[in-house]
């Protein structure tokens, strides 16, 4: 499983869990541009360094506009359907965007979607909806991994974020193991050293860490992901002293001990809007996870959190987020003749 929650959007997003890791599938063994109703998508705000050349199924690298000749309307079709999905259920926007292998289904309950950190994920039907539309327009061309990347990008945009270029050309894997959700996702309890090391193993930087953490500005989490901070911090049987005490009491009203079903907003402000709210909550010691609070314990991450918490505009964060999403989207991908193109994203693995 690649580092692809943050959205984690990631959101876009597996984004109700930690960072919204959004765009990869596992290999086998700018300027603020808010959404304005039904107006056309704005120009994309970030162009990655890859050549903007036409791609095809035989290409061995990710490209912007990969489907320009094989399925030229792919991104437009996803955007149009995402608008319909948002109109039906705005709360799905933070939930869309995760590693494509999390879509796979296990009859025995051993796939990634069955792992505890992924239990708050939803929106699988929405991804299948997008897949059916693209299969009708361009049979066997667009991978589920790329559909997730497109959906995560549009989820951010439709939640008042910016719209950025994405590289496409991923192919789908056929392996999905629950165990990998525990070893590849950043732990909610991770300290800053552990988080930096995990990102570094995926060739992601400290800046990528703090920027992608910003996807926690929208979405929800199960109480079980942070209940230790409320009731048994470091095995002490007490509340984490670094958590805002007023906020902790509010969370205790929502989450009782050993609660595995209740979900709560990751941003005590507006969990449906992609903005700078996350950085402000972290500065106010209202970050939901220990991993959020950990950003205050490194000079680089602290400086970025402070700058964005006090920023007059989200423009710099949006530009940085676009770059970090591209960086993350290059982790552990299948391209060229590797992998496959699933006809159904939620296929069985056993």
Image (cartoon, rainbow, N blue to C red):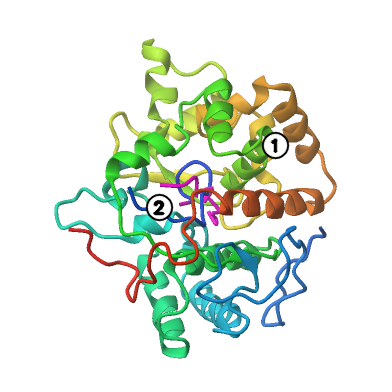
Q: Is residue 66 above or below residue 273?
A: below
Q: Nearer the viewer, residue 256 or 107?
A: 107
Q: CA distance from mark 1 to mark 2?
A: 26 Å
| Residue 90 visible in the snapshot | no
Q: Magenta stretch?
A: 1-14
Residue at far left of view: 108
Residue at far top of view: 236
Residue 121 rendering spot, x and y as whole percentages:
38, 54
**Residue that label 2 marks:** 27
Which tag is nearer the camera, tag 1 or tag 2? 2
Q: Nearer the viewer, residue 190 or 72?
A: 72
At mark 1, the secondary structure is helix
Residue 168 rendering spot, x and y as whole percentages:
57, 67
Q: Is residue 16 above or below residue 334?
A: above
Q: Nearer the viewer, residue 110 or 264?
A: 110
Asked where in the image residue 12 lies, by quadrant, the reply is: bottom right
- In the image: residue 302, left or right of residue 96: right
Dominant SS in magenta: loop
Residue 2 among those drawn in magenta? yes
**Residue that label 1 marks:** 207
- In the image: residue 148, left or right of residue 261: right
Asked where in the image residue 179 lies, by quadrant, the reply is: top left
Q: How many marks?
A: 2
Seen at 26% across and 51% down, the residue is: 111
Residue 186 rendering spot, x and y as whole percentages:
48, 35
At mark 2, the secondary structure is loop
Residue at far right of view: 312
Please state, as top left, top right, bottom left or bottom right, where the C terminus lies in the image: bottom left
């Amino acid at each position: 499983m690649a580092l692809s929650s943050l959205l984690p959007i990631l959101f876009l997003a597996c984004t109700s869990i930690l960072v919204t890791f959004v765009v990869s599938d596992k290999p086998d063994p700018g300027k603020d541009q808010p959404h304005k109703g039904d107006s056309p998508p704005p120009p994309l705000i970030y162009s990655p360094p890859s050549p903007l050349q036409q791609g095809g199924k035989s290409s061995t690298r990710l490209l912007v506009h990969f489907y320009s000749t094989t399925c030229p309307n792919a991104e437009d079709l996803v955007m149009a359907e995402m608008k319909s999905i948002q109109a039906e259920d705005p709360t799905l926007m933070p939930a869309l965007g995760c590693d494509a292998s999390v879509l796979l289904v296990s009859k025995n309950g051993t796939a990634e979607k069955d792992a505890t950190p992924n239990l708050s994920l939803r929106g699988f039907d929405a991804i299948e909806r997008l897949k059916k539309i693209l299969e009708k327009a361009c049979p066997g061309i667009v991978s589920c991994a790329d559909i997730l990347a497109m959906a995560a990008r549009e989820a951010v945009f439709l939640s008042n974020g910016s719209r950025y270029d994405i590289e496409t050309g991923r192919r789908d894997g056929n392996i999905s193991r629950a165990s990998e959700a525990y070893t590849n996702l950043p732990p909610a309890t991770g300290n800053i050293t552990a988080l930096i090391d995990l990102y570094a193993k995926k060739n992601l930087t400290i800046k990528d860490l703090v920027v992608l953490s910003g996807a926690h500005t929208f979405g929800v989490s199960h109480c079980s992901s942070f209940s230790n901070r409320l009731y048994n911090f470091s095995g002490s049987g007490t509340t984490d002293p670094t958590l805002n005490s007023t906020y902790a009491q509010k969370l205790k009203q929502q989450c009782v001990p050993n609660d595995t079903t209740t979900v709560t907003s990751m941003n005590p402000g507006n969990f449906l809007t992609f903005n700078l709210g996350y950085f402000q909550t972290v500065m106010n010691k209202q970050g939901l996870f220990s991993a959020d609070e950990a950003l205050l314990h490194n000079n680089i991450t602290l400086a970025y959190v402070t700058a964005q918490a006090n920023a007059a505009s989200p423009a710099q964060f949006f530009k940085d987020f676009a770059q970090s999403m591209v960086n993350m989207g290059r982790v552990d991908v299948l391209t060229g003749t590797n992998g496959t193109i699933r006809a159904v994203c939620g296929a069985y693995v056993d």
